[in-house]
Image (cartoon, grey):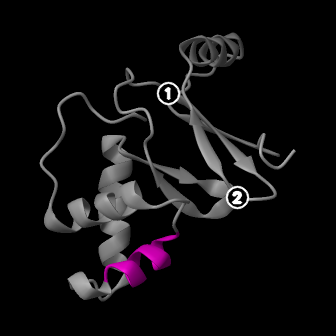
Amino acid sequence: MDHFPHTPPKLTKNQALVMKTLSKAAAPLSAYTILDKLRDNGFRAPLQVYRALDKLLNYGMVHRLESMNAFVACQHPESEPQVMVAFTICDSCGEVAEISDDSFDRRLQDLANTMGFTLTKSTVELSGLCSTCE
């Protein structure tokens, strides 16, 4: 599942703190940046952050941006769960936007099926310039 579940799970204290930190962030955050922001809340080791992030990823509440080795809160919690998630990443200012589109999701599934492949998850990262930086 790539999007926030319709029935939110009961989060642990650490999961809730990590989620709150990502939700308030203006940009994607690395696990170590999250750790630094949460030190006053008792976080001492990267493992605490990674465990929380792993569960939040499984719940579909958070996405990982591979190219940036960073995490963002899901921006489409009202959407139906989808396999396909895409992000635009501005090369100039670093702005990140999440794209969720049913037709693109279906098309990607169809392409995978044509190849005899069962798609379980996919994240596409598009780099370029946002409208402000063009």
**Would you name the residue on which mark 2 appears?**
94
- Distance from disc 2 to disc 1, alpha carbons, whole Å, reads 25 Å
The N terminus, quarter of image? top left
Q: Nearer the viewer, residue 52 or 28?
A: 28
Instruction: Residue 34: give x, y in percent of width and height.
Output: 41, 73
The image quadrant that residue 117 belongs to is top right
The foreground one among 99 and 53 is: 99
Q: Earlier in the sequence, mark 2 or mark 1?
A: 1
Magenta-span inclusion, residue 36: yes
Give the residue at x 39% y 59%.
24
Q: Nearer the viewer, mark 2 or mark 1?
A: 2
Q: Work out whether 99 lies above or below 101.
A: below
- Residue 19, picture quadrant: bottom left
Q: Quadrant of the C terminus?
A: top right
Instruction: Write the start and end of the magenta stretch as one range.
Output: 30-38
Q: Residues within 10 Å of mark 2 (few under 14, many from 20)?
A: some
Tell me the kind of residue under disc 1: Val
Compare residues 25 and 32 and report the one nearer the observer: 25
Can residue 107 be found in the magenta stretch?
A: no
Q: Residue at x 66, y 62 (%)?
A: 68
Q: Residue furthest right?
A: 134
Residue 91 shown left or right of residue 46 in the figure: right
Q: In the drawing, what numbered circle is on residue 10?
A: none
Residue 61 place in picture, x, y as percent? 35, 44
Residue 114, above or below 130: above
Label 1, secondary structure: give it: loop
Residue hosting label 1: 83
Taking the image as shown, residue 70 lies to the left or right of residue 47, namely right
Residue drawn at point x = 48 percent, y = 53 percent: 72
Q: Amino acid at mark 2?
A: Gly
- Callout 2: helix, strand or loop? loop
Relative vertical location of residue 76 with respect to residue 103 in this rendering, above or below:
below
